Amino acid sequence: MNMEKYLQERKAMVDKALHRLIPPEDAYPQMIHESIRYSIFAGGKRLRPILTLAAGELYNQDLSRYLPAACALEMIHCYSLIHDDLPAMDDDDYRRGKLTNHKVYGEAMAVLAGDALLTLAFEVLSRDSLNDSGAIIKVMQEIAAASGTAGMIGGQVVDLLSEGNPVSADTLNYIHSRKTGALIRASVRVGGILGGAGEEELKVLTRYGQCLGLAFQIIDDILDIEGEESKLGKKTGMDIQKRKATYPGIHGIEPAREKVKELYHASLSSLEIFEARGEALKILAGFLVNRDY
């Protein structure tokens, strides 16, 4: 499989669907739709929706049935980034090499753009006519739980409260597995749920998503120390400056790299049940853990 071609094709598919689902810039009131589109089309890799498509493809090659949920997950991810960049949160000026939303449209509009994306995500899910209502309800519950105080928001809260304070390995794991890991795990599970995965297969996909989600955040921690700003599209060294809890900060750089390798191999082992069908998910795992941006 040519991973670069695979990613380009899936990204183009998701982008096309997002263009269709998100109101155009000239829809009244124009500024909010300009603000939303500024961030959602700012160059994201679409990793979460691509994971949903890859997991769903294990069961059904008709990817159109997974696109609404895949786009909803990307909307929620984008909303979280807009809010994370606000002065009240991480106070970042750049994201993906572009000025952050609040630097262009102001803090109030950035808050509303994030709110609108979160709301639109569940509207899109509720309109899904390609899957049965029982599966859609399960998907909505899955995404809501991964996004709320038991997931992404909970991780962000503990991350904010931990800044500048001594943090245990357990607390760090809580932050990483929820702030970043929860939505990645949900992205994989959603593809399985919509594809009709059995209980055992869904457990396997959950394990894969958990390993990948934690590895993804540890790599982010490492890149904040060693990454190139030109590739990352944002300033490096901010975790140290803000005294954030990170894996290298607690365990060191080399143990962080070893942990990523351990999680990567665990993610591959979990996919053995799928044999050749799991090839795309295996290659995606390799891409995610070896990225430098």
Image (cartoon, rainbow, N blue to C red):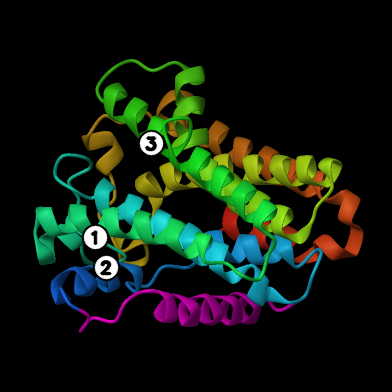
Asked if the magenta segment contains residue 3, the reply would be: yes
Q: Name the one closer to the observer, 165 or 255.
A: 165
Q: Position of residue 24 (x, y in %)?
A: 29, 81
Q: Which residue is mark 1?
A: 113
For residue 70, above or below residue 260: below
Please tell me which of labels 3 and 2 falls first in the chain.
Answer: 2
Residue at 67 percent across and 40 percent down: it is: 263
Q: Determine the CA span between mark 2 and mark 1.
A: 5 Å
User: Quick check: marks 2 and 1 in contact, CB under 8 Å?
Assistant: yes
Q: Main SS of the magenta segment?
A: helix
Please tell me which of labels 3 and 1 falls first in the chain.
Answer: 1
Residue 291 in view here: no
Residue at 56 percent across and 39 percent down: it is: 214
Magenta residues (range): 1-27
Q: Quadrant of residue 257?
A: top right
Q: Which residue is mark 2?
A: 36
- Look at the image and tell me in which quarter the C terminus lies: bottom left
Q: Quadrant of residue 38?
A: bottom left
Q: Determine the CA span between mark 3 and mark 2.
A: 20 Å
For residue 270, above or below residue 95: above
Q: Determine the CA span between mark 3 and mark 1.
A: 17 Å
Number of callouts in the render?
3
Q: Position of residue 197 (x, y in %)?
A: 80, 52
- Look at the image and tell me in which quarter the N terminus lies: bottom right
- Amino acid type indicated by mark 1: Ala
Q: Which residue is mark 3?
A: 153
Q: Tag on residue 219? A: none
Apparent side of residue 212 relative to residue 85 in the rendered image (left or right): right
